[in-house]
Amino acid sequence: VTAGDPSPTVTVPVMHALVAAGADILELGVPFSDPMADGPVIQRASERALALGVGLRHVLAMVREFRQTDTTTPVVLMGYANPIERMGQATFAAAAQEVGVDGVLVVDYPPEETVEFAALLAQHHIDPIFLLAPTSTTERIQAIASIAKGYVYYVSLKGVTGAGNIDVQEVSERITTIRKHVLVPVGVGFGIRDAASAAALGAVADAVVIGSKLIQEIEAAVAGVQAEQLADVAARAAGDWLRTIRHALDELPPRAVITETRISA
C-alpha cells in the first residue's frame, strides 16, 4: 500500500488489518512525484499522499507507530532514490533501523551502483531488495544475486504495476532460471488481481506481491466516506479482500520453502 493514502491516519490501521488477514510481509510505498515503474493506480495514490504532505520521514513515523503493537511482521519500504538521496543514505539507514524497517526496495538503484548502499543497509540489519524483469540478462541476475538479501522481486510483465495479463508458464520458466543463481526467495508481482492469479503464481513462486488491486479496493471503499470513518472503512476493505488471497494460497499443496534468509522467516 502507498503510505499516507487516502489519509495519513489510515496507513497504520490498514497495515494491521493486512497482517490480521494473512499478509506475511508488508511493502509500504513511499510517495514520490515520478513513480516511473508504477501504473495509474499507484500514481494516483502517490499524488493523493503527496498532496497531504506525506514524505519519507512521515513514512518512517508510520513504521514506528506500527511497531508499537507489531514487532514481528517484516516491513519493506518500496520507493525511489530521490527521497533517500535528499535525506542522505547514512541518515536514512540509521533512521530506518531505529523505527523497525526490515528491507528496502529502491526501484531506480541498479545493482551496479548499489554495492555501497547495500553494505550500509547491512550495517543496520536491513535487507536490500532488488527487482528482476523478463528482460534481465544472466549477468544482471548474477549481479543482483551477489548482493540481494531477504528476497528478490520478479516483475512478471514488461510494463508498469497493475498492467497486462500474466503468462504463468513463462513466469515459471523465468523463476527456474533465476533460482539457478539466486539463493533467496523469489516473489512475483505486477498484474496479480485476484485469488486465481495469486494461486497460479503461488504454485511456482515463493511469494506473490499485490499492490495496485489492493489500492483499488481501498480507493473504491472510501469514496464519499467521512474523514472520521476513513481508517475503519479502509482497513476493513483491505482485510476482507486480502483474506480471499490468503485462502487461495493456503489451499495450495505444501512446497519446499527457503528459510536461510532472515526476512522471510
Image (cartoon, rainbow, N blue to C red):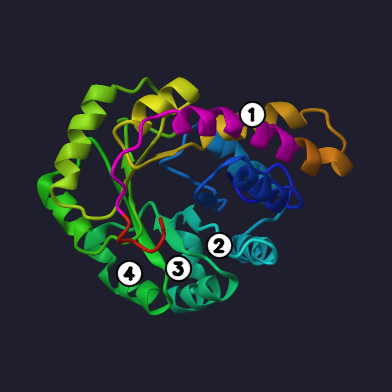
Q: Residues within 10 Å of mark 2 (few under 14, many from 20)?
A: few
Residue holding disc 2? 72
- Dividing the picture into quadrants, the one containing residue 146 is bottom left
Q: Is residue 231 left or right of residue 70?
A: right
Query: Which segment is the magenta one?
Result: 234-258
Of badges 2 and 1, nearer the viewer stands 2
Q: Residues within 10 Å of mark 3 (few under 14, many from 20)?
A: few
Q: Residues within 10 Å of mark 1 (few under 14, many from 20)?
A: some
Q: Is residue 77 above or below residue 48?
A: below
Element assignment for label 3:
helix
Name the magenta segment's main secondary structure: helix
The three-letter amino acid code for the residue at tag 3 is Glu
Q: Earlier in the sequence, mark 2 or mark 4?
A: 2
Assess whether mark 4 and mark 3 are in contact (beta carbons under 8 angstroms). Answer: no
Residue holding disc 1? 217
In reply to whether residue 243 is colored magenta, the answer given is: yes
Q: Earlier in the sequence, mark 3 or mark 1?
A: 3
Measure the C-alpha gap from mark 3 to mark 1.
Answer: 32 Å
Residue holding disc 3? 85
The three-letter amino acid code for the residue at tag 2 is Thr
User: Residue at (29%, 52%) from the top-left corner?
Assistant: 258
Q: Position of residue 247 (x, y in %)?
A: 53, 30
Q: Residues within 10 Å of mark 4 (few under 14, many from 20)?
A: many
Measure the C-alpha gap from mark 2 to mark 1.
Answer: 26 Å
Residue holding disc 4? 118
Of badges 3 and 4, nearer the viewer stands 4
Q: Earlier in the sequence, mark 2 or mark 1?
A: 2
Measure the C-alpha gap from mark 1 to mark 4.
Answer: 34 Å
Outermost residue toward the front in this view: 254
